[in-house]
Image (cartoon, rainbow, N blue to C red):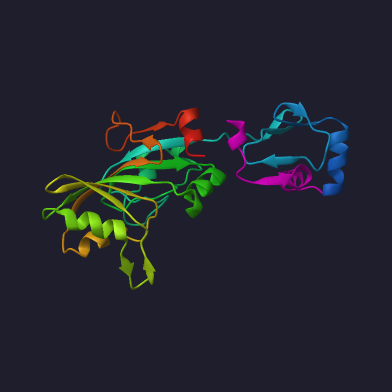
Amino acid sequence: MSNLVRSYTARLDRFLSAALKIKRADIRLLLAQKRVKVDGRVATDISQCVGQFSHISLDGQVLQSDVPRYLMMNKPAGVVSATKDAKNKTVLDLLSPEDRAGLHIPGRLDFNTTGLLLLTNDGHWSRQLSLPERNVAKVYTVTLAQPLDQSYIEAFAAGMYFEYENITTRPVTLEICSDYIAKLQLVEGRYHQIKRMFGRFQNEVVALHRDAIGPLNMDLSLAPGQCRALTPDEVLSLS
């Protein structure tokens, strides 16, 4: 997974100067004395690039030892997709303090939306995942208050104009599964987009569940609120 470890990079001398609070000119001596190791190897170049997940030590004392973490959660309804909230329980509150440390959320879900949610401490990975040009599709199951018909498929495929933002949504694939249930596939996530699109038909979204992000499907063995680590192949599939 080392090819994913790129969240930030900095010169080794800058990192050591900040971590040890010494002048950058003094870093050369530390390296000449072979006292600094990066990822288990003696560092010799002050301009060596290090990243968020580089293991760095001085005289055996660890200065940085973060490891990349990638999780999927089956988000339950009634929790906020945020790292902290003054009023409501957050998805991170569902984890133990040691498990939640350093995590953030790429691709949030609304308060009452359920399903696949990603958590990571790798900022580069999450930024790449959210780039518009990546066209990463998200799949949702939607339960409606009123029955569906063919006109929904056509309207969603054509895109809808939102006057407030002065934008037209990109085409959305809609598949009618039953009178009141549809599957949607879209590659953008405007503010309350799905609810607003169905709102054009005066049809209330009763329930919304995210099934997949790109090739990654929700692990159906996870109960609401549970999470597990992504496999290396799953991480790479979204990279």
Nearest to the observer: residue 5 or residue 131: 131
Question: Is residue 229 placed above or below 151 in the rendered structure?
Answer: above
Res 65 → quadrant: top right
Nearest to the observer: residue 93 or residue 55: 55
Q: Position of residue 196 (x, y in %)?
A: 26, 62
Q: Is residue 156 left or right of residue 128?
A: left
Q: Is residue 210 left or right of residue 42?
A: left
Residue at (55% x, 35% y) in the render: 68
Q: Position of residue 71 (x, y in %)?
A: 43, 36
Q: Position of residue 57 (x, y in %)?
A: 72, 32
| Magenta stretch encompasses residue 26 | no
Q: Is residue 60 left or right of residue 141?
A: right
Nearest to the observer: residue 181 or residue 33: 181
Is residue 195 in sight in this rendering?
Answer: no
Q: Which residues are magenta?
A: 1-23
Nearest to the observer: residue 78 or residue 167: 167
